[in-house]
């Protein structure tokens, strides 16, 4: 599965980078934002319990994403392929919007921009059988902000895999969620103590200062 950029159109056509490789710029402040499993038709088991939480956190993720984009922090979407091996991210976005309802509301709030990246994952962790590790390496990401659902399943699996690869990880407690408030509270108590993962709210995460237009990121020597 190739990591690609996405286009903000109704058909979500895929843009090809003008340069070589997976990415053309370093992440400002070595920071990246990952959005996990927020683009969906919500037709899987337990979706009815998770969807209200996802609607709530989507608004906060959208605000955090706007801050990241302004700061030159790259945004990567990671979504389950749900066994659709002939699918792609553009088709998933299109399908989610076509399904309507609150799922379409979430997708519209988090609609990918032309310079965002995405990976499709076959397992809970966004690292398994995807080019995520390579993409973050090309972007020189050292700190990963992991958002999305479900916090104690796919989000946690991805976050702990990132930690095992030496990244600093933040899992903002207001930009993640799971099926019940009790499960979310238990996880948020464990994250810093057990996994070494910060749970700073999205609005309080310190981001690098925005680069002046035309300014260069660190060179690649």
Image: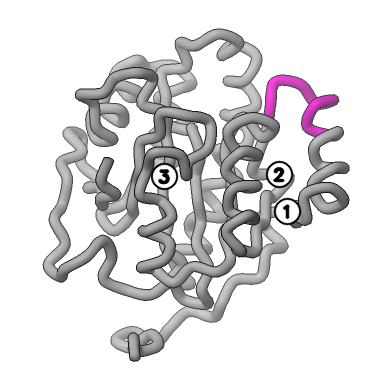
Q: Is residue 144 magenta?
A: no
Instruction: Estimate the x, y position of residue 180 in percent, counting from the top left.
Output: 76, 21
Q: Residues within 10 Å of mark 3 (few under 14, many from 20)?
A: many
Q: Name the N-terminal-most of marks 3 and 1.
A: 3
Give the number of the mark in front: 2 or 3.
3
Vertical relation: 138 (above or below) 215: above
The residue under label 1 is 201
Vertical relation: 178 (above or below) 20: above
Q: Which numbered disc covers residue 174? A: 2
Q: Which quadrant would the C terminus be assigned to in this image?
A: bottom left
Distance CA(mark 3)–CA(mark 1):
19 Å
| Segment tinted magenta in the rendering | 178-185
Q: Quadrant of residue 18?
A: bottom left
Distance CA(mark 2)–CA(mark 3):
18 Å
Main secondary-structure element of the magenta-colored stretch: helix
Instruction: Estimate the x, y position of residue 78 in percent, counting from the top left.
Output: 43, 40
Label 1, secondary structure: give it: loop
Q: Name the N-terminal-most of marks 2 and 1.
A: 2
The residue under label 3 is 77
Marks 2 and 1 in Cβ contact (< 8 Å): yes
């Amino acid at each position: 599965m190739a990591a690609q950029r996405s286009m903000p159109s109704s058909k979500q056509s895929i843009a090809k980078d003008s340069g070589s490789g997976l990415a053309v710029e370093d992440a400002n402040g070595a920071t990246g934002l990952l959005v996990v499993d927020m683009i969906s038709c919500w037709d899987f088991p337990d979706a009815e319990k998770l969807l209200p939480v996802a609607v709530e956190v989507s608004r906060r993720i959208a605000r955090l994403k706007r801050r990241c984009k302004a700061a030159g922090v790259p945004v990567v979407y990671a979504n389950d392929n749900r066994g659709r091996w002939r699918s792609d991210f553009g088709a998933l976005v299109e399908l989610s919007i076509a399904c309507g309802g609150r799922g379409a509301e979430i997708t519209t709030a988090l609609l990918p921009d032309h310079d965002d990246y995405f990976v499709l994952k076959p397992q809970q962790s966004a690292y398994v059988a995807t080019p995520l590790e390579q993409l973050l390496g090309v972007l020189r990401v050292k700190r990963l902000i992991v958002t999305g659902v479900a916090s104690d399943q796919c989000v946690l699996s991805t976050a702990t895999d990132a930690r095992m690869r030496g990244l600093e990880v933040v899992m903002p407690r207001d930009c993640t969620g799971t099926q019940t408030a009790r499960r979310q509270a238990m996880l948020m108590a464990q994250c810093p103590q057990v996994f070494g993962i910060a749970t700073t709210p999205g609005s309080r995460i310190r981001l690098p200062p925005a680069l002046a237009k035309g300014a260069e990121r660190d060179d690649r020597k």
